[in-house]
Amino acid sequence: MKVAILGAGNVGRTLGTGLAAAGHEILYAVREPDAPKNAALPGPHSRALPVRDAVAAADAVVLTTPWNAAEAALASAGDFGGKPLLDATNPIGPGFVLTHGHTDSGAEQVQRWAPSAKVVKAFNTTGVENMADPRYGDAKAVMLVAGDDADACAVALRLADELGFEAIRVGGLARARMLEPMAALWITLAMSPAHGRNIAFGLLRRAAPA
């Protein structure tokens, strides 16, 4: 699969490296593909392309920009043509406050900005350390996915599974109203000296009665 990474910062590069290692072709969608900083983008089977070209060539797109850059990045991408758009952003504004919540979400705003895409909330509830390695001994970090389109969600679930997560769909895109506060909680815990960034959410299951 050709996966365009829209945003080549720490999150984009970490996801790109993992997905390239899983056998996908990674297209880093950047404004200046020939710039020196983009010459050494990580991972096998990876290359930098202008934003619109990368999105046009991709089978799926992952949005990894900072929230305040998301609208402009999506505008530069052009028509998504019904492709899955995996939204890994979190709508965090000044003062570390979510700018959307309860009756709206950042993912739903992304869908309004990119109406030609099939938006799925994914990869937003944890940090790059877990994107690089979501395994904790025999356990896996959970990756919760929310989206209205079943096929687009299946793409997100597949990619999360290939990265090593326990991937679970939790419902439609409006469930991002739960996942984005969950991300804020992870960040709060990760910033605490008592926990640090090598933590992850998981899902425990009690054995069924005999």
Image: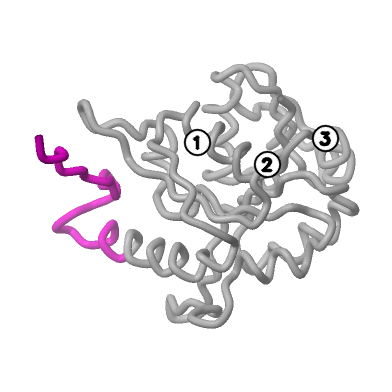
Magenta region, main secondary structure: loop
**Of callouts 3 and 1, which one flags the residue occurring earlier in the amino acid sequence?**
3
Q: Which residues are magenta?
A: 188-210
Look at the numbered disc 3 and give the secondary structure of its residue: strand
Assess whether residue 190 is covered by the magenta stretch. yes
Q: Position of residue 102 (x, y in %)?
A: 48, 81
Reading the image, the residue beneath label 3 is 49
Identify the image quadrant of residue 8.
top right
Give the residue type at disc 3.
Answer: Leu
| Above or below for 33 versus 86 | above
Q: Position of residue 187 (x, y in %)?
A: 35, 61
**Of callouts 2 and 3, which one flags the residue occurring earlier in the amino acid sequence?**
3
Which residue is drawn at the image coordinates 75% and 26% (left, top)?
Answer: 47
Local packing at callout 1 (Cα closer than 10 Å; few below 14, some 14-19, many 20+) is: many
Give the residue type at disc 2.
Answer: Asp
Reading the image, the residue beneath label 1 is 160
Reading the image, the residue beneath label 2 is 151
Q: Quick check: 54 left or right of 205?
A: right
Determine the CA span between mark 2 and mark 3: 26 Å
Front residue of 23 and 144: 144
Give the residue type at disc 1.
Answer: Ala
> Which label sits in the foreground, 2 or 1?
2
Assess whether residue 3 is covered by the magenta stretch. no
**Of callouts 2 and 1, which one flags the residue occurring earlier in the amino acid sequence?**
2
